[in-house]
Image: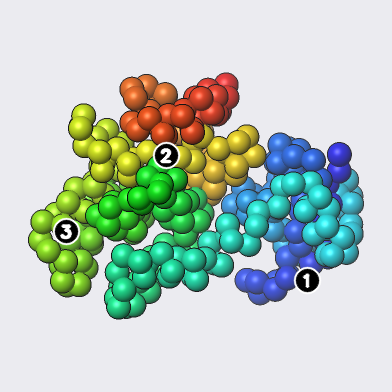
């Protein structure tokens, strides 16, 4: 069990940054960061970015200095490294391939949405989440695949994201109406997509709303991940709300977790329950504890 730190070689924000990792667990990494008073917004999924001015003090606190290539090897060996495809900035090609399946020839709209999902303030609600929802839809509907309306609703469901529950979903639905009408989709299809987007506000589709159930289950699929992916999800959500103090965030997050645990059902499709329900309940209960 050890904490490692590479040299401050990575330029950004008028300084250089080091990477801080654990070779054992994110819990160890977060505990060290907290004791060293490293800000939570410095966490990037599998490491902390720390400015050059902190280097000597972190070594003094017990971080082991290593070359960058050694740090990468240790991170890979630990099993904690996030693959490049799972990072927001590296997902243009896989997302474009998926876009072309449902909206070929609408490159300007794709680029607008890609920019929105790549906004700097997004940590969890970014391109990684979008791709995860699209992949979850595939998993829930294989081999036939999801309806186009559900796929497009996934593309728009967090297209507007300011961290304001309810308002974000409503504005995303209005954006879908405007952009898809301009793109020439039939009015009935546009209306259905907007309806689906608004459902992600509370994840409570009506009984018999199969498409709504699909989208809501895909959107919540992150809850049913393993302990490490779930820990990364919680950390990223905290970064999304970095402007909120710790006490207020803890109270708000606890309310969200209680609300999720009280959803009956949490997942609406049999396939989603099979894939994610048990793990999701374990993860949510552990987070509360």
Residue 47 is left or right of residue 278, and the answer is: right
Residue 39 is left or right of residue 131, and the answer is: right
Residue 99 at x, y percent in the picture: 37, 67
The answer to whether the residues at label 2 and label 1 have Cβ atoms under 8 Å apart is no
* Neighbour tally class for label 2: few under 14, some 14-19, many 20 plus, Cα within 10 Å: many
Q: CA distance from mark 2 to mark 3?
A: 23 Å
The mark that comes first in sequence, 1 or 3, is 1
Q: Quadrant of the C terminus?
A: top right
Which residue is disc 3 drawn over? 190
Residue 56 at x, y percent in the picture: 86, 57
Q: Residue at x 88, y 64 (%)?
A: 67
Q: Nearer the viewer, residue 125 or 267?
A: 267
Q: Quadrant of the N terminus?
A: top right
Which residue is disc 2 drawn over? 220
Taking 270 as reference, is 222 above or below it? below
Which residue is disc 1 drawn over? 9
Q: Is residue 62 visible?
A: yes
Q: Nearer the viewer, mark 1 or mark 3?
A: 3
Residue 204 is left or right of residue 118, and the answer is: left
Q: Is residue 231 visible?
A: no
Q: Nearer the viewer, mark 2 or mark 1?
A: 2
Residue 157 at x, y percent in the picture: 32, 52
Q: CA distance from mark 1 to mark 3?
A: 48 Å
């Amino acid at each position: 069990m050890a904490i490692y730190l590479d040299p401050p070689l990575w330029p950004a924000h008028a300084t250089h940054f080091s990477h801080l990792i654990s070779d054992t667990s994110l819990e160890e990494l977060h505990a060290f960061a907290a004791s060293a008073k490293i800000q939570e917004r410095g966490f990037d999924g599998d490491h902390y970015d720390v400015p050059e001015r902190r280097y000597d003090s972190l070594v003094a606190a017990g971080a082991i200095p290593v070359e960058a290539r050694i740090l990468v090897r240790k991170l890979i060996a630990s099993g904690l490294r996030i693959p490049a495809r799972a990072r927001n900035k590296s997902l243009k090609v896989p997302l474009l391939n998926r876009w072309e399946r449902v909206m070929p020839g609408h490159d300007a709209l794709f680029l607008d949405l890609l920019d929105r999902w790549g906004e700097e303030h997004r940590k969890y609600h970014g391109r990684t989440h979008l791709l995860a929802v699209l992949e979850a839809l595939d998993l829930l509907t294989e081999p036939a695949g999801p309806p186009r309306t559900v796929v497009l609703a996934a593309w728009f469901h967090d297209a507007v994201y300011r961290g304001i529950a309810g308002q974000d979903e409503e504005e995303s639905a209005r954006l879908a109406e405007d952009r898809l009408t301009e793109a020439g989709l039939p009015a009935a299809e546009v209306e259905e997509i907007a309806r689906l987007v608004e459902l992600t506000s509370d994840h409570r589709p009506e009984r018999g709303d199969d498409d709504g159930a699909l989208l809501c289950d895909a959107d919540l699929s992150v809850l049913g991940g393993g302990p490490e992916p779930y820990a990364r999800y919680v950390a990223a959500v905290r970064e999304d709300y970095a402007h909120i103090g710790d006490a207020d965030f803890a109270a708000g997050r606890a309310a969200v977790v209680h609300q999720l645990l009280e959803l009956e059902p949490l997942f609406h499709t049999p396939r989603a329950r099979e894939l994610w329900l048990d793990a999701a309940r374990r993860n949510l209960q552990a987070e509360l504890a």
